[in-house]
Each structure stands twice: as C-alpha cells, then as structure tokens.
Image (cartoon, grey):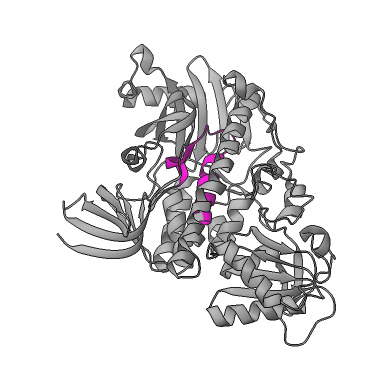
Amino acid sequence: MPEERTQVLVVGGSLVGLSAALFLRRQGVDLILAERHAGTSVHPRTPGYNGRTMELFRAAGVEEDVRAAGPWRLNGSGLLWAESLTSPNHHWLVPPNASGAQHAQDELAQVSPCSEAVLSQDVLEPVLRQHAEELGADLRFGTELESFTDEPGGVTAVLTDRATGTRSTVHADYLIAADGANSPIRAQLGIGRDGVGVLDDVAGIMVRTDLGDALRDKSFVICQVDNPGFSGMVRVVDDKLALHVSYRPDRGETVAEFTPQRCVELARAAAGIPDLAVEPLDVLPWQTTAAVARRFADGRVFLAGDAAHVMPPSGAYGANTGIQDAANLAWKLAYVLHGWAGPSLLASYEAERRPVAELTVNQALATGKEWFGAEVPAEIEEIELIDIVTLQFGYCYPPGSAAALVEDPRDPTGRPGTRAPHLWLSRTEGKMSTVDLWATGLVLLAGPGGAAWVEAAEAVARRDTLPLTPYRIGGDAPRGTPFLADPDRRWARSFGAGDSGAVLIRPDGFIAWRAPDAPGPHAVTTLEDALREVLGTAG
C-alpha cells in the first residue's frame, strides 16, 4: 500500500473543510483533503455568510470572488412568509434580533469593512475549492477515510479512492474532522454531545423548474410556505427549487416516501402553480439538531463545523460558525508546525470555540422560536436574544471564565480576547482597514508615541523569523517606521491604549495582548514575555 506524508489531513470537503484547506495553505501548511463525494455540493444550502466570515475571506484573498459568484439581489429582509410562492398573500419577515428594518446595515458598516454576502453553498464551495487548489492544496474528492489511529507522534490514516478502490496510507501531524453532523471520526473517538438533540427530521428536495416570470416581484433567501398541500421552507436559486419538508420516522414515515411524483406535487403546491413543469433531481434527508460536542479535540485530532456543533438553520449561523472554527484552528496549527508556537497553543482551540458554539446554538434556537414559532425546551425560552451586530462581531475569547462572552462591537474595549476593532486608516497607497493588517500574520499596533514598541517588534521578528509586523498609528509621520494615519482619531478610544501604548493582534483578528502605556527601558523583554504567553512557549 502506498505511503504518503503531509502536515495536516482534512477529512470532509464541504464548506468548513474547504475553508480549512484555504486558510492552512495561506499559512504555508501542506495538507491533504479527503472528501467521499465526487464533487462539491449540488444542494443550494446555507444562503448567507455574515460580515465576520467575509472578513476572514477578505484576509484569505477571496472576498471579491465570493461576492462575484453570488450577486443575489433581495427584496425586504430576504425572508418571506407566503401562502404560496405566487400568492398575493405574503409578507416580509424581520429578524427578531436585528436592530432596525435595514438588518442593521448602517451599524454593520461602522463595525466592519465587510458586509454579508448572500449566495448558496453550491455556488460558494467551487470558489473555495479553486483558490485552495491554486495555493497548492491536495484536494481529493471521491476519497473516503477508511480508518485512522492517533498516536503521540502523529495520525496515521488509510484512504480509499471510491472509484478505483485504491488504498493509501497517509501519515499526518494533525487531523481535522470536518466530516459532518454524524461525524464517524467523532464517533470513533467516543466524544458525546450535549444539547437539545434532534428537533426535526427533514427531507431536502431539489427540483428543476422555471419560476422566473412567476417570481418577478419577489427575490428572497428563504420563504416559509404554508398551505394545505405544502408546509415548509423553500429556496429558489436560478432554475433550482429547494424544498424542506418535515416527516415523522416515529410514525413509520421514511424519506423513501418522497418519490419523484410526490416531489413534483409538493413543488407545484409550494409554487401555487398546479401545472408547473417540474424535473425531480434529488432528495437528501437531514435533521434539525441542536448539540455541541463535549470535546473539540482529542490528541492530534480536532473537530470543526458540524462535527463539533449543529444548530437549527434559523439565522444561518451554522456554516458561519464552522468557517470561523477553521480560521481559529488554521493559524494555530500553522504556527505550531512552523515552530513559532508551542503545542500548548492548540489547547486554546477548544477553550475558545466551544463556548462560542454553545452561545450560537442557543441563539439559533431562540431565533427559531421568535421568528417561526418553533417549539423549544423551556430553558431556551428564557434565553435573551443578542442583536445581530453583537452576535456576529462581539463574541469574545475571554482569558477567564468570569469575563463576559460578548461585548458590543459598536463600543469596543480593545481588551485581550476581543476582536480587533475596525478603523479606517490612511497611508500613502490609500485607505485601508485594520482588518487588512492581520492577513499576513501577527500585527503590533502602537500609538503615535509608541516607537519603542515598534522597534522591539522589529527586533524580535528579525531574530526569531516570526511573522510579526509593527505599525505606528496617528501623530506625525515618523521616518523609517511603518506608519498609518488615523483620520478619525479612534485609536485610543477603540483599542484602550494610550499615546504610547500597543496591542498585539492574532492572525485571526483577535487581540492577544495589550500594553496601555510606554514599555519603559525593557521593551524587547516585555514583548518577548507577551509572545511566549500568547504562543504557548512560556516555561
């Protein structure tokens, strides 16, 4: 059996696996991705990618291509209730946690340079795949993980090419399980899940039909259709109609009952056109579930996306949370593999992402209750909805359990564990956001009087060949120092650092360390100590 060597093996080639591959290759990590299906998704799931996710795609250099792939124009909120798709009896829904009728767009523009993107999963995945492959990722579709063993020195996996039956052994330093809600890897590791569990069994039906003329006055992301012939969620993408219909296995119902003829009938009932020409394409069973894995890591194996957490589709939080898992994990794996960080850094993945997953699952449940009247357990009814801006950009990685898990990103504190605030800065080449600074690695931002911090960062980066870039912000342009003007004079207020202070920003855009004032005579030593703590090399 052929044997191969790579740094990271990613199992699962959907949104999260492809994002992980993209983010890892941006960090110079060798990887093999194994996906059992022959290609990317054909189902138009996951219609929305929030501003925080788009910041990560911006840093990865793919934001423009993602937006170009799905220029989806919407009416109203993009969320519709209707008796049928063509019925005059319809109205637009307003998300219960949106601050304002414009989906908080004005507030989002103050918080981030990135607005949300509306496009379906089957359109996004090929974009991620293309960019990952262009960066050198070894993506193997039609390849299944047959077995794996996790040992102190690495992971050994057996992969099978499903078309030829050819088997190969892959030795990897680490394994990322992005293999879905029913993750066989999680099952083998014996990792259970906490949460409400399965809420509903759903048949995802995809058909081809032409509704262009019938829907000329409606453009939506999701429509809740309710009539005697059809009750469920509907999505229209080009000439494809995706229907999501509940069924009851506890009453003996099975997904096999959704025959081609029944799918045609359901599509016609949802559209409100009895003689609509419909071509059945596929039926995919799935479950509405709310659960979080008890552990996100086991040895050298890490869970990400649906393998780590599953949540109802209300709010489209699931894919966004998974992509953000991948970003958090990718830079940490890269820094450990490149020798810039200690293995203990990887323990922070679970410590940071699991509380965020729990928060988001509960918010998805509460949103479904408020929005669609979904039945939820009594404890969920007591959960207070967090506004969309805070939920997208305000979650934190607090160093202590007593710290708040969210803060209002419109009034940032700049404390370690929070996302680095967005400021528009000026330089000779033009305007840029602070979001654009951390795309290449660690960033140190110092105030106008923070020249000592900048010099210390330059010295440490040279000596340790560490990707650490320093900038001074505000004040008069100094000589020989990377300088960014702060025309709105928001540096001190947003980052909580004074004229001579500094902050250290991680490669995922979160603040790792802050010094409110000047360093004194030992700037290099102070910064070295901070980096050891941040990168897990202390002691």
When asked about the image quadrant of residue 61, the answer is: bottom right
Q: Answer with left or right where residue 313 lies relative to residue 90.
A: left
Q: Would you say the magenta stretch is mainly helix, strand or loop?
A: helix
View extreme (front): residue: 539
View extreme (bottom): residue: 479
The reply to whether residue 494 is visible in this rendering is yes
Image coords of residue 211 (percent x, y): 50, 35
Q: Nearer the viewer, residue 29 or 161?
A: 29
Q: Is residue 310 magenta?
A: yes
Q: Is residue 434 magenta?
A: no
Q: Answer with left or right where residue 432 lies relative to residue 164.
A: right
Image coords of residue 201 (percent x, y): 42, 24
Q: Answer with left or right where residue 11 lies relative to residue 272.
A: left
In this picture, which residue range is highlighted in magenta? 304-328
Q: Nearer the viewer, residue 240 or 231?
A: 231
Image coords of residue 322 (percent x, y): 50, 46
* In this view, 498 is above or below 188: below
Query: Residue at the location (76% across, 65% down)?
Result: 424
The reply to whether residue 88 is visible in this rendering is no
How many numbered discs, if any?
0
Query: Residue at the location (36% across, 22% down)?
Result: 262
View extreme (top): residue: 251
- Quadrant for the N terminus, please: bottom left
When asked about the image quadrant of residue 43, the answer is: top left
* In this view, 376 is above or below 117: above
Image coords of residue 404 (percent x, y): 70, 42
